[in-house]
């Protein structure tokens, strides 16, 4: 079975046992993002500065926010949308869409989203942080649990 991604749009789907409201709060707040995505998150208005364990800092723009069903960002010069739908059993079906990824970064970005989505599931569904927070063991060195 092929992934529903193409060079024009990366698409990942993830089922979470947590309801959309809780998942949305993780994606849309500094505290939430710091629990699974980045070491530090500082939002002012529609601008978020995210700090990562490898020293990378990026300014992210919130392009749309429709609680609890959708949040969209301009992130590392590409467009990212998280769509959240109730699964009918109290959980969430999440679809991530990422457009505008440069061809020479496609494979790394495609894989890199798993390093965001699985930690999101760990926090949302099990209350655990799957990241190592170890600056000696980074994504750039082949570690997937930075």
Image (cartoon, helix red, strand yellow):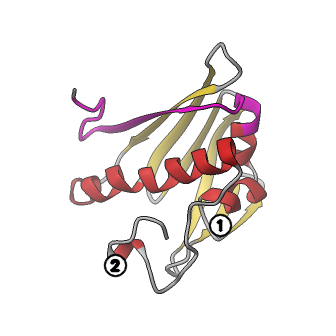
Position of 104 compared to 121: left or right? Answer: left
Q: Give how far apart the Cα atoms at labels 1 and 2 are.
A: 24 Å
Q: With 52 as the anchor, is 8 left or right in this view?
A: left
Find out whether the residues at labels 1 and 2 contact each other: C-beta distance under 8 Å: no
Q: Position of residue 10 (x, y in %)?
A: 35, 40
Q: Secondary structure at mark 1?
A: strand
Q: Which residues are magenta?
A: 2-22
Return the residue at label 2.
Answer: 141
Q: Residue at x 27, y 59 (%)?
A: 105
Res. 27 visible in picture:
no
Query: Against 48, is 100 above or below?
Result: above
Q: Is residue 61 left or right of residue 102?
A: right
Of 125 and 37, which appears nearest the observer? Answer: 125
Dot 2, how many residues are within 10 Å of its Cα: few (below 14), some (14-19), or many (20+)?
few
Q: Residue furthest bottom?
A: 136
Position of residue 89 relative to residue 56, above or below, is above
Residue 101 drawn in magenta: no
Q: Is residue 90 above or below residue 118?
A: above
Q: Residue at point 39% right, 56% down?
A: 112
Based on the picture, tell me whether residue 14 belongs to the magenta stretch: yes
Residue carrying label 1 = 49
Query: Measuring 27% from the left and 32% from the top, which residue is drawn there?
Result: 3
């Amino acid at each position: 079975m092929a992934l529903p991604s193409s060079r024009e749009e990366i698409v990942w789907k993830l089922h979470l046992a947590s309801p959309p409201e809780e998942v949305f709060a993780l994606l849309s707040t500094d505290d939430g993002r710091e629990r699974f995505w980045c070491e530090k998150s500082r939002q002012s208005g529609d601008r978020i500065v995210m700090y990562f364990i490898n020293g990378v800092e990026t300014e992210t723009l919130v392009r749309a926010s429709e609680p609890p069903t959708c949040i969209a960002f301009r992130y590392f010069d590409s467009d990212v949308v998280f769509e959240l739908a109730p699964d009918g059993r109290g959980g969430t079906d999440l679809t991530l869409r990422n457009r505008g990824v440069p061809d020479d970064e496609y494979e790394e970005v495609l894989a890199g989203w798993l390093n965001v989505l699985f930690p999101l599931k760990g926090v949302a569904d099990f209350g655990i942080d799957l990241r190592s927070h170890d600056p000696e063991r980074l994504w750039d060195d082949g570690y997937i649990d930075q």
